[in-house]
């Protein structure tokens, strides 16, 4: 979940292959790729987060959990909470209360189907190539969704969602970046570029700058 097994010295050496990325990496020491508890959860959450803000994506995920997840008692606060729904639950429950498009509901059910029938092992696909082949066969799953989910949910250290808005902005600002030079660690380069994008956006919003 917290990517604590990665070796910092390996990443530092890899990022030196590109002078821009090496600089950004040095400005943000200790960066890691935030993973997910489960590959299926990462897939569905990624679909819900398409073309919406991160905060609203979280709201939609909460709505999905309340619509189809199992209700359990919180062990510490003794209140009801919802577990993320299983593929089988998503295939059975009505998702109309989730404020997303009909097309995305269709995609979510299609993802639930390929996991439920064993086409995709959400705990450990056979290879990154096989993962992408399966995901690209699902209606509504494009390159961004497949790459982002591979990064967050399936431990793919080389995943790179190149069509992501923040990444495109940083690559445009620094056209000299050769992203493939840091392979097979492009996911970490993506995290560094996102950090730079966030800093640049915050600077542009700060009236004191």
Image (spheres, grey):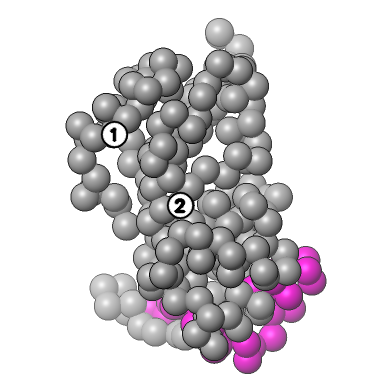
Which percent across, then down, holds residue 152? 45, 55
Residue pointed to by mark 2? 151
Instruction: Tell whether position 83 is magenta.
Output: yes
Visible in this render: residue 43?
Answer: yes
Q: Secondary structure at mark 2?
A: helix
Of 190 and 80, nearer the camera is: 190
Where, quadrant-wise, is the N terminus in this rendering?
bottom left
Q: Is residue 150 above or below residue 18?
A: below
- Figure check: 16 above or below 161: above
**Could you tell me residue 116's position as x and y percent?**
53, 86
The answer to whether residue 201 is magenta is: no
Relative depth, front residue between 17 and 29: 17
The residue segment tinted magenta is 79-108
Residue positioned 58% across, 69% down in the render: 134
Number of numbered callouts drawn? 2
Cα–Cα gap, marks 2 and 1: 16 Å
Say which residue appears at 48% left-offset and 47% top-offset.
159
x, y percent for residue 22: 37, 20
Q: Are marks 2 and 1 in contact (CB under 8 Å)?
A: no
Kindly identify which residue carries mark 1. Answer: 11
């Amino acid at each position: 979940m917290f990517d604590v097994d990665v070796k910092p010295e390996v990443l530092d050496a890899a990022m030196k292959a590109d002078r821009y990325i090496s600089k950004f990496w040095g400005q943000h020491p200790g960066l890691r790729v935030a993973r997910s508890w489960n590959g299926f959860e990462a897939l569905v959450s990624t679909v819900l987060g398409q073309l919406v803000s991160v905060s609203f994506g979280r709201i939609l995920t909460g709505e999905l959990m309340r619509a189809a997840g199992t209700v359990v008692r919180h062990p510490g606060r003794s209140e009801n909470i919802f577990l993320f729904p299983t593929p089988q639950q998503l295939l059975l429950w009505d998702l109309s209360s989730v404020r997303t498009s009909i097309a995305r509901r269709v995609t979510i059910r299609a993802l639930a189907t390929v996991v439920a029938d064993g086409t995709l092992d959400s705990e450990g696909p056979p290879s990154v190539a096989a993962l992408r082949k399966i995901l690209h066969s699902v209606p509504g799953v494009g390159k961004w969704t497949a790459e982002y989910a591979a990064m967050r949910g399936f431990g793919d250290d080389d995943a790179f969602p190149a069509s992501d808005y923040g990444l495109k902005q940083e690559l445009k600002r620094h056209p000299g970046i050769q992203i493939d030079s840091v392979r097979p660690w492009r996911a970490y380069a993506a995290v560094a570029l996102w950090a730079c994008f966030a800093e640049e956006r915050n600077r542009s919003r700060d009236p004191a700058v």
